[in-house]
Image (cartoon, rainbow, N blue to C red):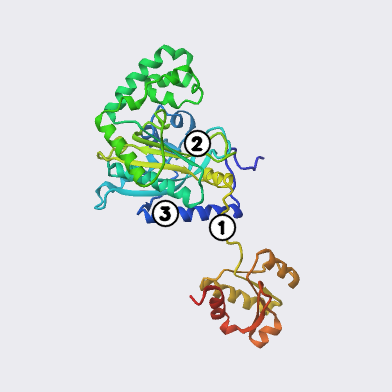
Amino acid sequence: MNIKAPRGTVDVLPKDAKKWQFVENKIKGICDKYHYEEIRTPVFEHTEVFSRGVGDSTDIVQKEMYTFEDRGGRSLTLRPEGTAAVTRAFVQNKLYGEANQPVKLYYFMQMFRYERPQAGRMRQLNQFGVEVLGSADPAVDAEVIDLAMTVYRSLGLTSLKLVINSLGDVESRKRHRDALIKHFTPYKEELCEDCQSRLEQNPMRILDCKVDRDHPSMKTAPSILDYLNEDSVEYFEKVKKYLELMGIEYEVDPNLVRGLDYYNHTAFEIMSEAEGFGAITTLAGGGRYNGLVEQLGGPATPGIGFGMGIERLLMALEAENVEIPLEEALDCFIVSMGEEPKSEVVRITHELRQYGIQVDQDYQGRKIKAQFKAADRYKAKYVLVLGEEELEKNVINVKEMATGEQVEIPLDQLTLTMKEKLLGGK
């Protein structure tokens, strides 16, 4: 019997979970300042949501999705990415009819992709992402990028590189597509099997191929920037201008195409340049996807967003030796001696918790010495001791561990006293 976690999945144990909680709370605070609201979607969707939304020619749809048939014969897929799922929710719940536009959303989601597991890229992965639906203003593109950069910087990362590109509008992409087909056709038999099929389906994705990236034809491939029409050029220039006004440095990479079919206009990636981070340097990526809402049955609605891997974020923090501040000290640990004091400790523990104090007690029936050792392991700020003698006097012994100071406090004044000591009376 195999009772280990499936390949490509990991357990996040309590000590590490505190790091995740810190990062997630920091991100939520930033989203609040940027006026983004949280959305939560089902962990699985009808397969068509991803095959139509992400694109049949993508690696995600062709190779990586966990797809199954339910008992009703319906094809369902575990969520491989967030944008299509959020867009489906936007359409189904008619958020395009909300008075406040654009709709600015963020999410924390578990994604599932069947790919070769490696550091920072698992089969079950965790993503933070944002989606803005309902605005074609290039200032929104800049804001989304700014939000992502702010997350990384606020957590202490400094070795970052922002790479941007424009994929142009429909007209620009069609002209570029024709040029790519003409360029790569003479080399078709020299390209990998995937790129041979991409040549007709989505030739731009050849530029994103990891297998053929050193092929000579890549160096001379037509650049999308040479095929942008006037409107697309103007849009891209505004995005760059707004980034510069915010003091955000960037590099333009004409070969940055992203791996999903729905992107147009702005595309971007944020990479770690930290020494020893690893071969896969991308931390976050995203871009504009005007047209996706229509593909999923909604009205014409522009959109832009990004996805950020939490595992890779934690790896980047470790690579840059950024310490996550963790509050590991317990407020109070209560030591009891005897059956009657134990009953009173149960009541006290409950009461203190109701007033916002973090408290624990012994549940192992240990001797008093072992209970004090447990308090030390929990790094308790205060140890409260209640035995038969204290109970008869209706008091409890309170010891402050940092100073060693001990005082006896009447039981009916304990809650008020501990609130004053730990919470400043709040």
As drawn, the label of residue 325 is 1
Residue closest to the eye, 245 or 67: 245
Left or right: residue 394 versus residue 146 is right
Q: Which type of secondary structure does the marked residue at label 2 adopt? A: loop
On the question of residue 147 being in view, the answer is yes
Residue closest to the eye, 7 or 135: 135
What residue did someone put label 3 on? 30
Q: Do callouts 3 and 1 mark residues in contact (Cβ within 8 Å)?
A: no
Q: Position of residue 150 (x, y in %)?
A: 43, 49
As drawn, the label of residue 113 is 2
Going from N to C along the chain, the mark reached first, 3 or 1, is 3
Label 3: few (<14), some or many (≥20) within 10 Å?
A: some
Q: Which residue type does callout 2 highlight? A: Arg
Q: Quadrant of residue 1?
A: top right
Q: CA distance from mark 3 to mark 1?
A: 18 Å
Q: Which residue type does callout 3 highlight? A: Ile
> What residue do we see at 28% from left, 29% from top?
170
